[in-house]
Image (cartoon, rainbow, N blue to C red):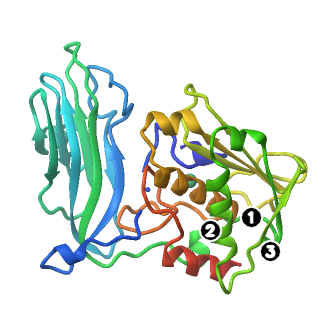
Amino acid sequence: MKHIVRFASIALVIFAVVFSHYYSSQHVYASTVQEVDLRSSNYPDTYLDGYKGIYDRAVTTSSTITSYRLHFLRIATATNDRVSVSSSYNTTTQEAGTIYLSQSGYVTDVWTPWITGSAYVNLITTNDGNVSTGFVIDKIEYNGTSSPLVNSAAFYPNSFSSVSNLSVYQSSSVSTYGYTSFVNNGLNILDIITNANIGFTPSTSSTAQVQISANNSTGLDYFALTQPYSSSGSPISSVDTTTWSYATVVFNNAVMNSWGFSTDNKQKTVTHELGHVLSLKHQDNIDVNSIMKVGKLTITSPSSTDISNLQYRW
Ligand SMILES: [Zn+2]
């Protein structure tokens, strides 16, 4: 994944991320619904013809989730293409998986049956010249208890030595593309967490500890990136233990707009990247409620899990 070096919020080729809202009151059983973002590749563009497997999306949940079902916001396919959910990543099980749309068409608001264990969502396409927009899964409903990464497990093995007074430089590009208020909101949300020594100070120096910019490049396949550097100016990977000297954060306005990002979606992305600045890792299990989930989500501030993790670390 791109995260070998860069902590991408969401490359279009990767994917995976919440909500402070629970829908459990809508259900008789004590199940929980979380917002998720699982799409076929290339969304919202057309997909390539004649592929099987390339559009698979693995669904991973906490081991303490006993069963779950997924909600398709929509499914769109061309002739002879289909969307299915299967239990493993191979052609046979994909072909045999529960099929949700097997003919050219467009459907919305489809729940899968209840699932146990991991699952793969497959977009199977035939080489007939027809392309369409694939699928979007926007919710998971689950039984059992979500178990997020907590304490040290929620963090990279590297970070700033202290985040109590990080200097923050915002390039003029942040304002140009309309991200100033998102950045200031995100910084403030993290700054005011109690019992955590987190602080940000605006700086006019482009060599500040946190250097934030924005671009409008449709050709780049990320919503946002955070990249820490060592004192020698070398990029620090997510697995090494080097102390950070400074970090760059980049927001890609064009790609967010092309995916139809709302104000909340953009605020989520900005706050998420600032979470990376504080060394938080992604929460990959899709049942987890966290600003550190990947994807186009409407959570805009750290969840209680995120806050307790930040209090633990800082
Ligand atoms: Zn991220």
Q: Position of residue 297 (x, y in %)?
A: 42, 55
Left or right side of 150 for 49: left
Q: Amino acid at mark 3?
A: Ser
Left or right side of 55 for 110: left
Q: What residue appears at the point 63 percent right and 76 percent down from the top-left corner?
A: 310
Spatial CA span between label 3 and label 1: 13 Å
Q: Secondary structure at mark 1?
A: loop
Q: Amino acid at mark 2?
A: Phe
Task: Please tell me whether residue 53 is drawn above or below residue 287 in the rendered image.
Answer: above
Q: What residue appears at the point 61 percent right and 75 percent down from the top-left corner?
A: 152
Left or right side of 40 for 250: right
Q: Specify the label residue 164 is tagged with.
A: 3
Q: Specify the label residue 155 is tagged with.
A: 2
Q: What residue appears at the point 29 percent right and 34 percent down from the top-left corner?
A: 53
Spatial CA span between label 2 and label 1: 9 Å
Which residue occupies the foreground of this view, 12 or 118?
A: 12
Q: Are marks 2 and 1 in contact (CB under 8 Å)?
A: yes
Q: Is residue 89 visible?
A: no
**What residue is pinned by disc 1?**
159
